[in-house]
Amino acid sequence: MAAQASAFKKGAIVRVKLYQFLTYEDVEFRPGPRLNVVMGPNGTGKSSIVCAIAIGLGASPKVLGRADTLTEFILTGKDHAVTEIELLADEASGKTRTVERHISRGSRGTSKWKIDGKAATEPQVKKLVEGLNIQIANLCTFLPQEKVGEFSAFDDVGLLRETELALGGQALLDQHQALVDLEKTAADAARRAKSAEEELEEVSRRLKELEPDQARLARKREHEARAALCEQRLLWVRFYEKRVEALASREAKKAAVAAFKEADEAAKPARATRADAHRDHQEAQQRYCKVQQDINDKMDTSTRVNQAFLKRKDELDVQADGGGNLDRQAKTARQKADQAKAANVEAQRKLAACGAVDQAAIKRRVQALQPALAEAKRRATEAVDAAADARDARDAPKRAIADCKARLARLGGAEQRRAQDFARAHGVAGGQCNSLRAWIDANAAKFRRPVLGPVALEVKVESEAARATIEACVGVWIWRSFVCQSKHDYDLLYKVCTDKKWRGVNLHTCEQPKGMQQRPYQGAVLQRLKAAGAQGYLDEFIEAPAPVLDILYGHHQVGGILIGDEKFERIFGTAAEKDLRTPRGYLCFSCAADRSVDGGYVVSRFHATVSKYGQRDTTVATSRAHGPTGKLPAAAARVDDEETRLKQAEANAEKDLANAEKAFADATKASTAADRVLQDEQRKTDDTAKDLNAYNRCKVAVEITKDKMDRSEARAAKLEGDLEKESATQRRRVAQALTKVTAALQAYADADAAVHAATAAIAPAMALREFAHDGLKTADEALKEKEEAAHELQRIANEAMQAFDRLKNETRELKETAEAAAPSDDAELTKKLDELPDTVAEVEAVLEGERKEARAIHEDAGLAPKIAELTRRKATLEQKVGGMDAETEQHARDIDRLKAPWERTLRDALAELRDKFSDYMGALGARGTVQLVEAPTFAKWGLAIMVAFRDASDLQQLAAHVQSGGERSVSTIMFLMALQAHLPSPFRVVDEINQGMDEINERIVFKRIVLNSTGPDAPQYWLITPKLLQGLYDMEHPDVRALVVYNGAYNVKRPADWDLSGFLDKKRRAVAAG
């Protein structure tokens, strides 16, 4: 986007747009490139423009001095506000940059930024602003209404700090602060150095007092050192003696090993003899085992032959018994055939007993009964099906009833419905509040006092009109708040909300409710207002716990707001309105039925503000809203439409179920009757066919018994024929089996004879084995005697070796211990040790003597540590004092190095400022200068404004007890104007700088402002003023643009009289007419 005028300087404001910011609902305007005079009655929103420029360019609310949080800049009753400021970024191309700030309500307000329509961060915005040389925090650049008096209240030190910031920027102020910090550091270092020197003197004195004790302690240390030498010598002497023992043990070990080897050689022949005997014994044992195995094999063969013989014998017995078995089978078959013949004769007798039966006639009678039986079956089946359908028809209404009951249970009671309505009205934030409420109830033991909230569910109002009114008065964010009654509970909830990222929840603390402090209307005044339509204070219609009411008192002053009906609204603009007026204005609401919406209301808001200046005029702003919106759920237990519908559906389902139950009972009764008819028809049919069935059964029995008789007779005849044929074959098989039995018996006799022959060879083999065993035993006894002698010598040799190894290890350990305590390569120490005796007894005697001498000298247990600590402290302090002296000298050099450029820059800038201020004061017919106030420390350096308004008087420092209020205001303004001339800035903002001035001084000040803010080199200037004097001809300059603010419907008593187009036409005609 390109700027509309090329005369703008880089960083100047090209366009401002505000939405729901302070008093503005929605406004956009474009200032001029030079002097912009923003005019309008008090309370119309002039200072709101100043606030929008500061807040929109990243300033903190504290810079303005009128609010602590961003939420206070949001239009009352709204949830967010937007500022949009367009800045010139390049003079040559006309390129601009647009900065947007979106402010939302929260615990302290949250902001979102955009640069040229794209999301940005606050550091990015500040970097852009600083890059355009815009200094919102500098009072010479940005002087809001609340800060005008603050500048004149600065003391010398504060005035110098602000002047430094204006003349040299933050760099010059940082140089001054660096000098202050360095000077403070140097003073601290000097104090520490003096303290260290005094401590060093005290430590030296104490060491001097301890010198006699040190001498006595030195003698004791000499004896202890001599004793330590004896202990070292004793270690070496013990090593020497142990080494002699080790050498003797080594010789004994050699002798024992030699004796063992000799005995071992003597045992070798016995070992050979024993090996031969062992070999003979093994051979005899193997021969014995071989003979034994042969016997076992022969016995196994005899066993197998015996089993074969027994098998042949069994076969012979089977063949001998085979003929008898076939004879028994033939006899049994003949008996069964006779039994079957007798059964057939009996069946024929029963058939003959039935007599003659007319089968055709019986069949005709049965067939005649079949249609009635079939019809009865059909009706019975239909009745059963109808009963089943009636039974199934009951399921649908039963399910409907259960569903309605479940849904009614989910709807819950009135409080549960309020929570559901609250969640629907507040969206995600409402759901978070309900979740937090559930968490609080589940963890009640963690809290010290009850936690109230969300506020919307704690507050109950007695009427829908009151509910609509309180929704219009109270911000939406308060309904999503929780009230903690202790700091511990607040911290716990804050951590829970942070961890769970419940950003839609607001937290407050109220440990001790204060209640409503004072009502604005009482007594007769309140009675007159009620007679005019006022219904009472807003809090009188609210039912809530005391801590919740306290939050509403503090944030929305519900205890001081009157509400009324349509009649109450008609008092505004009449004489009766005077009862509402207070020194601070008033805030009232009226509520009337909304005829366009069933159950809705129109809420009117009347907000009066009183100007702090001039005639203290009262301005009334009016706005209207429709409600209730549902942000505050209805408190009354109302019959919900859904609940009514569900109950009606449940009643209908119960009626359907009753009808279905009746139909089921009727169908069951019909089914029972049809079943009885079917049973009667079936019995008639069965009785008619009874004789025919008996005749058929007898006939079938004759046929079955005859078939069985024929088959039994055939089997018996066949078995009798087979028996005759088998008699010759059986005799032949018995003869063959007898031959096989005889052969098997002979084989068994031969096998048994072989076993007896093998048994005869076992006796010689056994005798040879016993002889070899005796020889092995004799050789073992001879070898054992030799081995035992060798083993004993081996044991002696092993013990000698172990004794030598032990002495060798002990000798090595003694040497290592001695080397560690008194190294042999220390020639000086070795020389001292050699002067001592050579035996353990003598060295121990000397050691005991030295210890006795050392013990005879008394030693204070704390003396040595005390001397060591004092000596250490003395060395440390000497080093510390030396370092501090160097540090002090360095600080002095650093101060000199920093002071020269800072003071030179400051004095040069003050010289130019002094000339400019003197010129400006001279234009007033007065005198003025500025003086640098030097002090012993840089922290107390200051700046004095010296003025004189009469020729006969001397220059005096600007002060409340010397000059009048008007003189101080004029002097301050001229000083600020002189400062601004030295501070390069793309624009400057001054809010109501003319307050407290008389007409003469005000004209002079405005003339100076015009001179400083017009012309091609002048920066953009914003002058905020509620009025302009008549005849300010200096303002008639092409670089001056007037921005008239007339925000609010009640600034003109009759709005129809305000015709801006008509005013401009008259002015144009007057100018054209000359």
Image (cartoon, grey):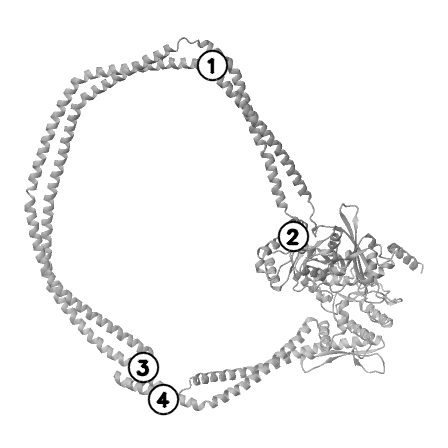
**Do callouts 2 and 1 mark residues in contact (Cβ within 8 Å)?**
no
Place of residue 380 in the rendered image (x, y in percent of width and height, measured from the top left): 54, 23
Q: What amino acid is found at the position of numbered circle 3 in the picture?
A: Gln
Residue picked out by circle 3:
232
Q: What amino acid is found at the position of numbered circle 2 in the picture?
A: Gly
Per the model, the C-alpha gap separating discs 2 and 1 is: 85 Å
> Callout 1: helix, strand or loop?
helix
Neighbour class for label 3 at 10 Å: few (<14), some, many (≥20)?
Answer: many
**Which of the two labelled residues, at mark 2 and mark 1, occupies the earlier sequence position?**
2
Place of residue 184 in the rendered image (x, y in percent of width and height, measured from the top left): 63, 79
Neighbour class for label 2 at 10 Å: few (<14), some, many (≥20)?
Answer: many
Place of residue 387 in the rendered image (x, y in percent of width and height, measured from the top left): 56, 28
> Callout 3: helix, strand or loop?
helix
Residue picked out by circle 4:
856
Furthest residue toward bottom:
212
**Placement of 357 over or under 446, stated as above or below:** above
> Callout 4: helix, strand or loop?
helix
**Do callouts 3 and 4 mark residues in contact (Cβ within 8 Å)?**
no
**Do callouts 4 and 1 mark residues in contact (Cβ within 8 Å)?**
no
Residue picked out by circle 2:
430
Residue picked out by circle 1:
688
Q: In this rendering, which labeled residue sits more in front, label 3 or label 4?
A: 4
| Residue appearing at x 27%, y 78% in the figure | 239
